[in-house]
Image (tube, rainbow, N blue to C red):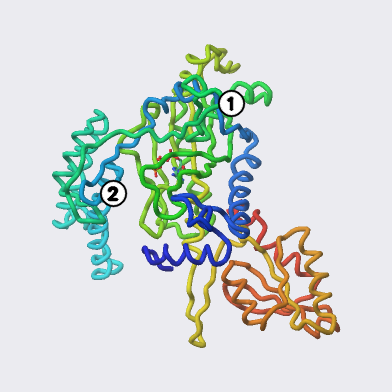
Amino acid sequence: MASNEDNLKDVVSHAKEYGFVFPSSDIYDGLSATYDYGQLGSELKNNLKQYWWKSMVQMHENIVGIDAAIFMHPTTWKASGHVDAFNDPLIDNKDSKKRYRADVLIEEYIAKIEAKINKDVAKGFKRFGDDFDEAQFRATNPNVTRRQAQIDEINDKFKTALEADDLEGIRQLIIDLEIACPISGSKNWTEVRQFNLMFSTELGSVAGDASKIYLRPETAQGIFVNYSNVQKSGRMKIPFGIAQIGKAFRNEIIARQFIFRMREFEQMEMQFFVRPGEEMKWYDYWKETRIKWHNALGLGEDNYRFHDHIKLAHYANAACDIEFNFPMGFKELEGIHSRTDFDLKQHEEHSGKKLRYFDPELNEHYVPYVVETSIGLDRLFLAVLSKAYEVEKLEDGTERSVLRIPPPLSPYKAAVFPLTKKDGLPEVAREIMAKLQFDHNCQYDEKDAIGKRYRRQDAIGTPYCITVDHQTLEDQTVTIRERDSMSQERVHIDELNNIIDQRVNMRTLLLK
Ligand code: ATP
């Protein structure tokens, strides 16, 4: 599995070639940072949603799901703080005229030092093998401790500037660290400015501020404003959760890196309402539960890490990210935030409606505290696709492109082939397909030699290929070939559904 920028380029072109992801409005040369999911991409995306929904909503008796509108009353965004504070600090390079997020420039600088430390650690491993004591090495190796001290110092200054909203301090840090524009190498920077990320539009036919509404920048607020409706109509008892999958929109300053950062994307969020004072217990619970959910996908436990936020958002009393080792390095995949009672209290204040819970055990009313899990569906898609993609060298010296997508997520679960187009083989193949289709998404293919058909299915991640030949007409057996091992077995037609189900049923992920 390659893990570098080349891998990203290969993944992007593979995704386009096979109908997973296309640039949006491709015939007009695309629209920056906007993508369309193709015929196979939407299957994979739906399967990812299903894995999340099943595990978060249907397998938790105290979590329910909703589907709120994208447009919301404009006061929602005043109350949530987005109108005043949903900003990113931007900086322009005067020579290249390229625009950057100032905080990201600093974070990337830190990541480069971290990479050097990790390189030294890897060398240590190589040299000392099993005797290598990583913790001791990190604590005593002069190169590592010097670099770590450098990181700590930058982080301290960065945090102080962020907390004080000191834009000049952030700019000074970029100048002091001699950070250069990655494109031109120039260090000629403008001042840092705040930029609000919300898209606005007008409701109805009246222009002007009164009718200004926003495209939601997160799905969470659709949950908060429905807290009371759901709690009452669903007779929910604390602790309980409300989940939602839906589109969100952010006018990102720079949106690069394929579907990692888009201006229109999809989130899967869950707000868990708890007793005040119990939020840290639930924060730990959700950290553990979510990482377990990720690990079940089998993309490699080393590819995930927790990263605590260095600056907490105004509403949070604890927050971390689950970062994933994307082709461009470790980046945020999911956020887990303890949001206190901030949102509900703000909505109480702005709406004048009480958003309380009567706790019969404590015999008191309170505004619940909230622990949120928030994952970007498109980032999850990229995580799966980039780790699944492999160009494998085979024993006979040839190569095959294979997508080792976890089988329950694969767009097609099986492909059915007649060996030839004659002698009644296509009819039998279609009969098999017609039976399997009730439980599994299947594809029929009769074109080209069998080897070529196998390659096509490997390239789109289909776990099983079933071939009908002349022997099938005599004894009702077929060949079933497995994607990863490429092993083939002769089985009776009646066994097919079971064999496929054992590997592709969502249960196999949910039970892990
Ligand atoms: P980042 O720091 O990368 O901008 P964020 O901290 O602003 O992300 P959150 O507000 O915590 O992100 O949103 C929750 C999740 O939504 C993120 O973990 C990410 O997976 C996803 N997400 C956020 N912004 C985008 C985007 N522009 N494109 C795709 N996914 C996104």
Residue depth check, mark 2 versus mark 1: number of the one nearer the observer: 1
Kindly give the residue lying farthest to the bottom in the view shown. 396
For the C terminus, the image quarter is: bottom right
- Measured from the top left, where is residue 97 in percent x and y? 26, 48
Does residue 476 appear left or right of residue 372 in this picture?
right
The N terminus sits in image quarter = bottom left
Q: Is residue 476 depicted above or below 189 in this figure?
A: below
In the image, taking residue 151 as reference, residue 61 lies left or right, namely right
Label 2: which residue?
Answer: 98
Task: Say which residue label 1 marks.
Answer: 204
102 sits left or right of 357 in the view? left
- Which residue corresponds to the image point at 73% horizontal and 79% vertical from the top-left? 490
Q: Could you say where residue 238 lies in the image, as x and y percent from the top left?
A: 58, 25
The secondary element bearing badge 2 is classed as loop
Amino acid type of disc 2?
Answer: Lys
Tell me which residue sits at (48%, 50%) in the image. Answer: 34
Q: Nearer the viewer, residue 317 or 95?
A: 95
